[in-house]
Image (spheres, helix red, strand yellow):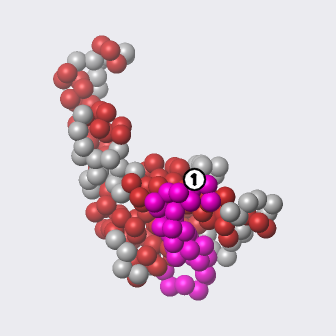
């Protein structure tokens, strides 16, 4: 079977859906390669800074790695701006959605809201509210998000920093993306169980 026969999902057979599940599993296995390709595209995004967005992400991930952070944290830092290219108005949410099946709820939350927390460093220069992050002050991860931005985002625009190359992080990325944690509601709804 190279493709299903149905043109409406309600007409599909068990065999066809089992075939599609196998095809989807093969596609999912290629996620690390697609992530790497998307990261490389960041080399040509947002100009004006002293380094490009890929270098910024590599610098943050290198700092996290050298600080002894967990693999999940390193990958979260590496991918935190992956959404800049396609979702300039909601890049944090896009990055968080990519990470959600693979990282803790805490890291998902931090990446999802890091854009608001990052505004602390610049919004007042542009007519915005640098204290917008205060809307999250009751979150148990409020300080963690502050620390994430302070340690691995706002300080990662140094053209002289000796960052590791993207390929250095590929094995870490593959480890983290090798198995969903089972916290993804779509996965639980689809299969009725975690991971």
Q: Closest to the observer: 58 or 63?
A: 63
Q: Quick one: which residue is furthest to the front in this view?
A: 138
Q: In this view, does 2 lie above or below 174?
A: above
Is 47 situated above or below 183?
below
Which span of residues is magenta-colored?
Answer: 134-163
Q: Where is residue 15 in the image (x, y as percent from the top left)?
A: 18, 23
In the rendered view, does 62 fall on the left or right side of 121? Answer: left
Q: Pinpoint residue 175: horizontal percent, then vertical percent.
A: 28, 63
Residue 47 coordinates in the image, percent (x, y):
69, 66
Q: Can residue 105 be seen in this view?
A: yes
SS at mark 1 in the image: helix
- For residue 47: magenta? no
**Is residue 99 left or right of 148 when viewed as pictured?**
left
Residue 130 occupies quadrant: bottom right
**Mark 1 surroundings within 10 Å by alpha-carbon count, few (fewer than 14), some (14 through 19), many (20 or more):** many
Horizontal side, residue 85 vs residue 171: left or right: right
Picture quarter containing residue 133? Answer: bottom right
Q: To which residue does mark 1 refer?
A: 91
Q: Which of 130 and 168 is in front in this view?
A: 130
Residue found at x 36% / y 40%? 185
Is 99 rendered above or below residue 124?
above
> Which residue sits at x=36%, y=37%?
186
* Extreme residue toward the top, this view: 11
For image coordinates 34% across by 71% down, the residue present is 70
Magenta highlight on residue 151: yes
Residue 77 position within the rendered picture, expressed as x and y whole percent measured from the top left: 47, 67
């Amino acid at each position: 079977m190279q493709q299903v026969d149905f043109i409406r999902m309600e007409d599909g057979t068990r065999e066809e859906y089992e075939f599609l599940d196998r095809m989807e599993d093969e596609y999912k296995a290629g996620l690390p390669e697609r992530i790497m390709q998307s990261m490389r595209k960041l080399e040509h995004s947002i100009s004006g800074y002293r380094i490009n967005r890929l270098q910024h992400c590599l610098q943050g991930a290198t700092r996290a790695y050298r600080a002894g952070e967990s693999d999940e944290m390193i990958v979260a830092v590496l991918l935190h701006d992956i959404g800049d290219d396609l979702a300039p108005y909601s890049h944090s949410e896009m990055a968080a959605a990519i990470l959600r099946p693979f990282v803790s709820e805490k890291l998902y939350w931090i990446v999802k809201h890091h854009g608001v927390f990052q505004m602390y460093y610049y919004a007042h220069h542009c007519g915005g509210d640098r204290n917008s992050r205060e809307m999250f002050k009751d979150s148990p991860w409020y300080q963690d998000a502050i620390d994430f931005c302070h340690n691995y985002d706002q300080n990662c625009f140094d053209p002289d920093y000796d960052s590791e190359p993207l390929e250095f992080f590929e094995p870490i990325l593959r480890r983290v993306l090798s198995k969903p944690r089972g916290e993804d509601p779509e996965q639980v709804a689809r299969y009725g169980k975690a991971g």
